[in-house]
Image: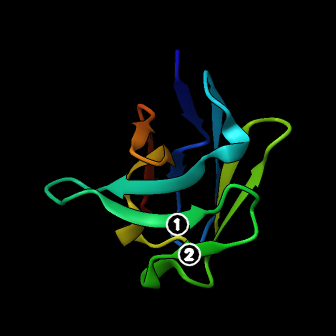
Amino acid sequence: QVQLVESGGGLVQPGGSLRLSCEASGFTFSTAYMRWYRQAPGKERELVAGISSAGGATMYLDSVKGRFTISRDNLRKTVHLQMNSLKPEDTAVYYCNAQRGSWSAFGQGTQVTVSS
């Protein structure tokens, strides 16, 4: 059974940092492209960052470039999103996504709230 379990969300002040983690099971993690999406209230889900199966290629939403870093550990079957210099507009539920070919799966999400 495919499982993606996110953790690390919470309440943080503007300018602060959080590190999200996603633990994967039930599929061959090392062959999957991994992404982080987010969805703010009243808005569509948007792609925040992605990382290739071996970790050699990454991509970022323009508004998070230079502040967020995606990484993965294929031995531990985890993907992380380090978020620095957080802004109120980063407030959203963050979802981990795994994709390989036509197959894709999402986790349940973790809430990130940036507020003073």
Disc 2 is placed on an element classified as strand
Q: For residue 12, which numbered disc appears in the image?
A: none
Q: Residue furthest top?
A: 1
Question: At x 49% / y 55%, what residue is drawn?
Answer: 36
Q: Nearer the viewer, residue 53 or 14?
A: 53
Question: At x 54% / y 31%, what residue is drawn?
Answer: 4
Residue 38: which quarter of the image? Answer: bottom left
Sequence-first disc among 1 and 2: 1
Quadrant including the C terminus: bottom left
Q: Are marks 1 and 2 in contact (CB under 8 Å)?
A: yes
Q: Residues within 10 Å of mark 1 (few under 14, many from 20)?
A: many
Q: Amino acid at mark 2?
A: Met
Percent of width and height locating residue 88: 39, 69
Q: For residue 59, which numbered disc appears in the image?
A: 2
Percent of width and height locating residue 43: 18, 60
Residue 60 visible? The answer is: yes
Residue 78 visible? The answer is: no
Residue 52: which quarter of the image? Answer: bottom right
Percent of width and height locating residue 16: 62, 66
Q: In the rendered image, which residue does mark 1 sit on?
A: 49
Percent of width and height locating residue 6: 55, 36
Q: Residue furthest left?
A: 42
Residue 77: which quarter of the image? Answer: top right
Q: Amino acid at mark 1?
A: Ala
Compared with residue 45, is residue 104 higher up or lower down, i.e. above or below? above
Question: At x 68% / y 55%, what residue is drawn?
Answer: 53
**Number of marks in picture:** 2
Q: Nearer the viewer, residue 17 or 28?
A: 28
For residue 10, side relative to residue 111 (left or right): right
| Cα distance in 3D space between marks 1 and 2 | 5 Å
For residue 67, side relative to residue 49 (left or right): right
